[in-house]
Image (cartoon, helix red, strand yellow):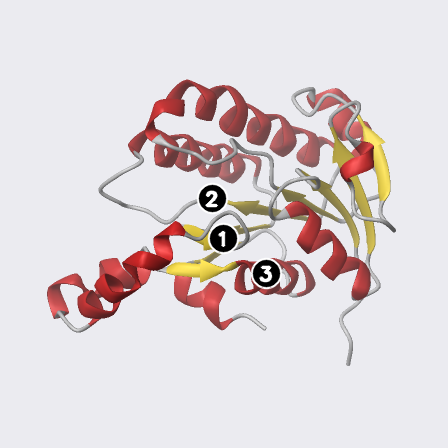
Amino acid sequence: MPPRPRRIAITGATGYLGRVVTCKLLANEHDVTALVRHGTRHRVAAGAHVVELDLFNPDELATALKGRDTVLHLVGTAHPNPSKAEEFVRVDLASARACAAAAASADVQHFVYVSVAQPAPVMKAYIAARMEAERVLGKTQLTATVLRPWYVLGPGHRWPVLLSPLYALATLIPALRAGAQRLGLVTLEQMTNALVHAIEQPPRTGSRKIMEVPDIRAAR
């Protein structure tokens, strides 16, 4: 039986993940609304409804989320690296805080959030911002799915493929195996499939589901 059509709002719909997952959801006959910054509607995938607004304003977001049953929050700092610590708080955390508050106000049934694999030996500020966003989301008591990739391989995002031999070696060493699996690489296709799966198969009402890297790779 095909999944029930969803009424989905996507923040960050013009980004690396956003455009691809929008196309996939539209192909699966879901009703998709892209919530985007003013002046960026031309970057939204064809077929989606578009609302231009302030993505950091909970009141504007809540108005846009009325009538939506699912929100996928993808706003974040492009090409994160340790030098962008302040931006992680100003953009990643602040936008997640606003969207979670708006979703609770609008009675959205399911909140899907892309966090990051944790713990990890690097990117401390980025992980801290995403962990805090998870905590904020948990306080709303929204039904939620949290995905925790480490790095998503795709166009313009391929340099970590050079580390594949090290990952393969680490999985053979018992002491390193869990970390290698938790911090493994996923492809853009795997991540997109996992996001669509998360939206089409929400957890039971009031609960929270965590999808780690192995779960993301296995999603269909």
Work out whether 190 lies above or below 172.
above
- Which amino acid, by three-letter code, is at mark 2? Ser
* Mark 3 Cα-neighbour bin, 10 Å: few <14, some 14–19, many ≥20: some
Q: Residues within 10 Å of mark 1 (few under 14, many from 20)?
A: many
Q: Which residue is mark 1?
A: 147
Question: Which residue: 60% across, 58% down?
Answer: 195
The kind of residue on which mark 3 rests is: Pro
Mark found first going from the N terminus, 1 or 3: 1
Label 1 sits on a secondary structure element that is strand
The answer to whether any part of residue 127 appears in the image is yes
Amino acid at the residue labelled 1 = Leu
In the rendering, at what x and y percent does residue 99 appear? 64, 31
Q: Is residue 189 left or right of residue 108?
A: left
Query: Quadrant of residue 202 in the image?
Result: bottom right
Q: How many marks?
A: 3
Tags 2 and 3 in contact by the CB under 8 Å rule? no
Tell me the CA gap for discs 2 and 3. 17 Å
Residue at (25% x, 69% y) in the render: 168
* Residue matched to label 2: 115
For the residues bearing labels 1 and 2, Cβ distance under 8 angstroms: yes
Q: Which residue is mark 3?
A: 203
Residue placed farthest to the bottom in the image?
A: 1
The x, y position of residue 61, in whole percent, is 74, 28
Horizontal arrangement in the rendering, residue 133 relative to residue 117 (left or right): right
